[in-house]
């Protein structure tokens, strides 16, 4: 360990025992494996626990201050059971005296809840990414008391009912004998301290509601229902505790041309019968056209593409254009599936009718028989067949 132990706890070299304990408690709440499963946090928790082990012990601290190695010789170190048990940690958490049956007073400061907000974006914005400003209403740390919950110049005082333990013994007599249980202290609600004069701004809660404007980056390729996480932007906890996360749930508005299936886009193009028969080239808008005006994401994007319709194209034909769909969150791009619908001409004038009759005659189609094929069998039909078989 090369880092300075005082730096690790974020305290000055002249910090007293109380300040060191307070600093460790604050860090432990942030990095303890029970609240923070991140492996890096666990490493950090070991380091700060080691620093606390040394600096909370007057003898070890004095040795460390003289430049000595407080772990010299013994080969100790945190995590090998070198005199730093879980109880010690619990003591640090709960202010000592927790070694008995109880859990001691609970901290006023707790992590806040996660918050969820819905954000509606256009299909093209979900596909190509967008930066949006959003307004969020969450609890933030009270600026008047900095989360302490106390009026300026006042401090929490130990609870007289439980003498700071946060819990009181409760004895019940039953036919089995006396049952003694510990219950949260009703006077201080288990905190072990009482706020004699609550902060007026937050009524002692340590947090106030506030409306903020946040900038959120929606990455390209998000789908309907994707949640984008903004760490630490959720609700600040009671007692000004660390904020939860904010989740922005993306919802895409329906698009007038394209529908999305996974990373593929689907659209329908309607063609006159003559064009389908003769073949043609169509110019169709891309989804990119929607964001082409956007300076950040739209520069250099193709706003249209050409679709070749081969002579003799049938109604219902699907044309798949590779790579013209939605970019995937992990790279790649879906396809664009264009379904061609051939329109039969209606409201023919006499001349058009004459031409079509002539065309039919040339093609020998004046009296078509129609080709009959089996249709898809309904569930009802299959049931009836199954029933009749018995
Ligand atoms: Zn306050
Ligand atoms: Zn109490």
Image (tube, rainbow, N blue to C red):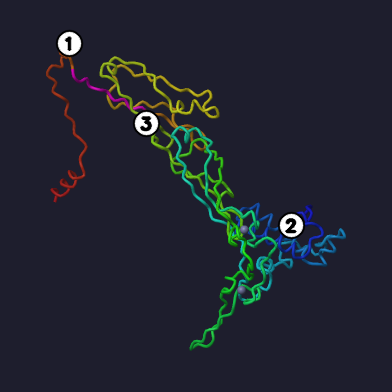
Q: Are marks 2 and 1 in contact (CB under 8 Å)?
A: no
- In whole angstroms, how far apart are the C-alphas of marks 3 and 2? 58 Å
User: Is residue 342 highlighted in magenta?
Assistant: yes
Instruction: Reply above or below: 44 against 255.
Output: below
Q: Residues within 10 Å of mark 3 (few under 14, many from 20)?
A: few
**Cβ of disc 2 within 8 Å of ligand 1?**
no
From the image, tell me which residue sits under label 3: 256
Can you identify the residue that label 2 sits on? 9
Give the percent coordinates (x, y) of residue 189.
57, 70
Residue 62, visible in the rendered structure: yes
| Main secondary structure type of the part rendered in magenta | strand
- Magenta residues, as a range? 338-347
Q: Nearer the viewer, residue 246 or 46?
A: 246
Residue wearing tag 1: 351
283 is higher (above) or lower (below) than 13: above
Q: Residue at x 56, y 56 (%)?
A: 112
Q: Secondary structure at mark 3?
A: loop
């Amino acid at each position: 360990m090369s880092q300075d132990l005082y730096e690790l706890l974020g305290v000055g070299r002249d910090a007293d025992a109380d300040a060191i304990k307070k600093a460790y408690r604050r860090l432990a709440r942030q990095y303890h494996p029970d609240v923070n499963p991140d492996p890096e946090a666990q490493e950090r928790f070991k380091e700060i626990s080691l620093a606390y082990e040394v600096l909370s012990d007057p003898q070890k601290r004095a040795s460390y201050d003289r430049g000595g190695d407080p772990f010299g010789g013994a080969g100790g170190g945190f995590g090998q059971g070198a005199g730093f048990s879980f109880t010690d940690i619990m003591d640090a958490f709960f202010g000592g005296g927790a070694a008995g049956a109880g859990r001691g007073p609970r901290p006023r400061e707790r992590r806040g809840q996660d918050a969820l907000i819905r954000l509606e974006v256009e299909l093209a914005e979900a596909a190509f990414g967008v930066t949006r400003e959003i307004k969020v209403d969450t609890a933030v740390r009270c600026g008047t008391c900095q989360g302490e919950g106390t009026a300026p110049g006042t401090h929490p005082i130990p609870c007289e009912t439980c003498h700071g333990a946060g819990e009181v013994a409760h004895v019940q007599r039953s036919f089995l004998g006396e049952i003694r249980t510990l219950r949260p202290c009703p006077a201080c609600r288990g905190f072990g301290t009482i706020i004699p004069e609550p902060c007026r701004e937050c009524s002692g809660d340590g947090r106030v509601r506030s409306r903020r404007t946040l900038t959120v980056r929606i990455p390209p390729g998000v789908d309907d229902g994707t949640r984008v996480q903004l760490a630490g932007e959720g609700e600040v906890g009671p007692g000004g505790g660390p904020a939860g996360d904010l989740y922005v749930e993306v919802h895409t508005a329906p698009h007038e041309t394209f529908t999305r299936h996974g990373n593929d886009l689907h659209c329908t193009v309607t063609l006159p019968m003559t064009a389908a028969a003769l073949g043609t080239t169509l110019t169709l808008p891309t989804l990119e056209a929607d964001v082409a005006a956007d300076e950040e994401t739209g520069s250099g994007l193709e706003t249209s593409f050409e679709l070749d319709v081969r002579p003799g194209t049938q109604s219902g034909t699907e044309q798949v254009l590779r790579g013209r769909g939605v970019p995937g969150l992990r790279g790649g791009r879906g396809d664009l599936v264009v379904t061609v619908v051939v329109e039969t001409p209606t409201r023919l004038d006499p001349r058009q009718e004459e031409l079509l009759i002539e065309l039919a005659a040339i093609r020998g189609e004046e009296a078509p028989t129609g080709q009959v094929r089996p249709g898809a069998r309904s569930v009802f039909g299959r049931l009836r067949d199954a029933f009749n078989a018995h």
